[in-house]
Image (cartoon, grey):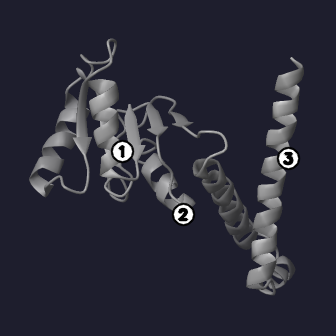
Amino acid sequence: VLIFAQRRQTLDLIERQLLKRSEHLHNVAHLRMDGQTSKHDRDDVLRQFREDPSVDILMLTTKVGGLGLSLTTADTVIFVEHDWNPQVDLQAMDRAHRLGQSRAVTVYRLVTESTIEQRLMSAQRFKLAMTSAVVKESKDTLTKIGGLSESDLLALWRAEMKEDEEEKKEKQQRDCHH
């Protein structure tokens, strides 16, 4: 399992509150790699995670788990925190989706309802949709998108946020009626 967070403090919290204090998880072998991990220690951590079947979890910050890292021994990826830039999360996720991966990889994104994370995920979807439109669409569409002002793009993002809020309200109403 790979557990990704944006900040070292979040990894500290997971390690302290979940992995060390939990009745069921305190014996789970885990390793950690963040911005304070030296190059020498990083190589040792990666080797141990790849070779030692008793190590179940590798906790990483998304920046340290970015480019140039292959972790195909993992088949589960858990994001505890998310980046405003969807490419950062996608690069981190790709660490488990490398050549040599023989198993399906399951990705979990932990998002608490009515929090900044929910808005952040909405912003990520919007940014990915814009990237997709720019990359995939015809020259006419590119010209049209290129003609959007900053306020037009902001209006599109606000519309996406409004849709998310409306979906949330509908879900709450359905849940209240059940």
Which numbered disc flags the more N-terminal residue, 1 or 3?
1
Q: Residue at x 44, y 30 (%)?
A: 75
Judging from the image, what secondary structure is the residue with disc 3 in? helix
Near mark 3 (Cα within 10 A), the count class, few <14, some 14-19 or many ≥20, is few
The residue indicated by pointer 3 is 166
Which numbered disc flags the more N-terminal residue, 2 or 3?
2
Which is nearer the eye, 95 or 160? Answer: 160
Q: Which labelled disc corresponds to residue 85?
A: 2
Judging from the image, what secondary structure is the residue with disc 1 in? helix
Eyeballing the image, is 142 above or below 99?
A: below
Q: Which labelled disc corresponds to residue 10?
A: 1
Residue 35 in the image: x percent, y percent?
24, 57
Q: Are marks 1 and 3 in contact (CB under 8 Å)?
A: no
Would residue 172 be found to the left or right of residue 39 on screen? right
The reply to whether residue 120 is visible in this rendering is yes
Which is nearer the eye, 28 or 133? Answer: 28
Q: CA distance from mark 1 to mark 3?
A: 31 Å
Would residue 33 be found to the left or right of residue 121 on screen? left
Residue type of the residue flagged with mark 2: Asn
